[in-house]
Amino acid sequence: MTIEKYVEDVYYKECNEVKDMTIKELIVLSNKYKTDSIYLTKNKYPVFMFEHIDFLDVLLSNELDVNVLEYIKKHPKKINVLNYDTNIIDAYYYMRSNNLKKVAVIKNNELIGEVNFKMISARIADIVIKDPLTGVYNEKYFEVLIEEYKDFDKPLGIIYIDIKNTGVIEGLYGREKVNEILKAIADKLKNLLRDIDFIFRNDFRFKIITFSPLDVTEKIINRIRKSLDNFEIDGIKIAYSLSFSHIPELESNVLLALDDLERNLID
């Protein structure tokens, strides 16, 4: 996964376009286009970037009437650049280690925009806790929430849903059909649950955590059964098994609940 899809547009001018401009005129240009920063480029490659802090320094140093190119010669600045095909994790570590809030992005040695650290960090967080196939949470995050539950003072409902006959379906229709089914079931579960509930996938099993009383957990289960009992894709009937447990109504602690879930999957 590269940073290309996370590139944001920027405003830039070629150096030869601003060679007769003063810093004051550049500030006017910035205000006109309502941009936080202006990149200067040579042959579209970024060589300098003006931010609001630079314009503030200009005001304080009384350099408003200084020529733009003269100013950047007098105040050289390193421009951090990443190539568009940089892996998002590599970009994250580069920006973090250099304490960078944003970085210019180039493609074929030409400026195409910039990425900001806040967005990259958010995407990294998604990669760590999300299942890339379905977009629901992954098993690692399920384990984190289960481990953290000991510090919660809330009722906990846990539901396991095993999708059956995936080996047969893969043999007849291929792995892509299995993936299509898993994505469709994930989408269906998302629509059945509330924003405050959590869905996870581990291979052919979906897990659900809901911090709700037993009666609410049972309503969720009934909705799931009603939706999945007659669910099919392209004429393929989707078989499943479901098991659930609840703390403190059905079990006294998480470990006992997880043991019950494994034992009591309903065929």
Image (cartoon, rainbow, N blue to C red):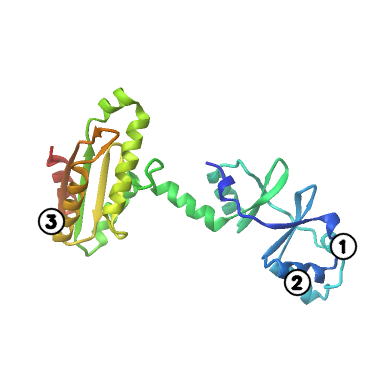
Whole-percent x and y of residue 130? 39, 47
Rendered position, 93 above or below 19: above
Whole-percent x and y of residue 73? 85, 59
Q: Residues within 10 Å of mark 3 (few under 14, many from 20)?
A: few
Q: Quadrant of residue 168?
A: top left
Residue pointed to by mark 1: 70
Residue pointed to by mark 2: 57
- Amino acid on which disc 2 is placed: Asp
On the question of residue 143 being in view, the answer is: no
Whole-percent x and y of residue 195? 32, 59
Q: Residue at x 78, y 72 (%)?
A: 58
- Amino acid on which disc 1 is placed: Glu
Q: Secondary structure at mark 2?
A: helix
Mark 3 or mark 2: whose residue is earlier in sequence: 2
- Amino acid on which disc 3 is placed: Ser
Q: Quadrant of residue 11?
A: bottom right
Mark 3 or mark 1: whose residue is earlier in sequence: 1
Q: Residues within 10 Å of mark 1 (few under 14, many from 20)?
A: few
Residue pointed to by mark 3: 252
- In the picture, measured across the screen, residue 50 lies left or right of residue 220, that is right
Q: Residue at x 87, y 62 (%)?
A: 70
- In the picture, measured across the screen, residue 217 lies left or right of residue 81, that is left
Q: Quadrant of residue 12?
A: bottom right
Q: Residues within 10 Å of mark 2 (few under 14, many from 20)?
A: few
Rendered position, 133 above or below 63: above
Q: Pick the quarter of the image with the C terminus.
A: top left
Whole-percent x and y of residue 141? 34, 49
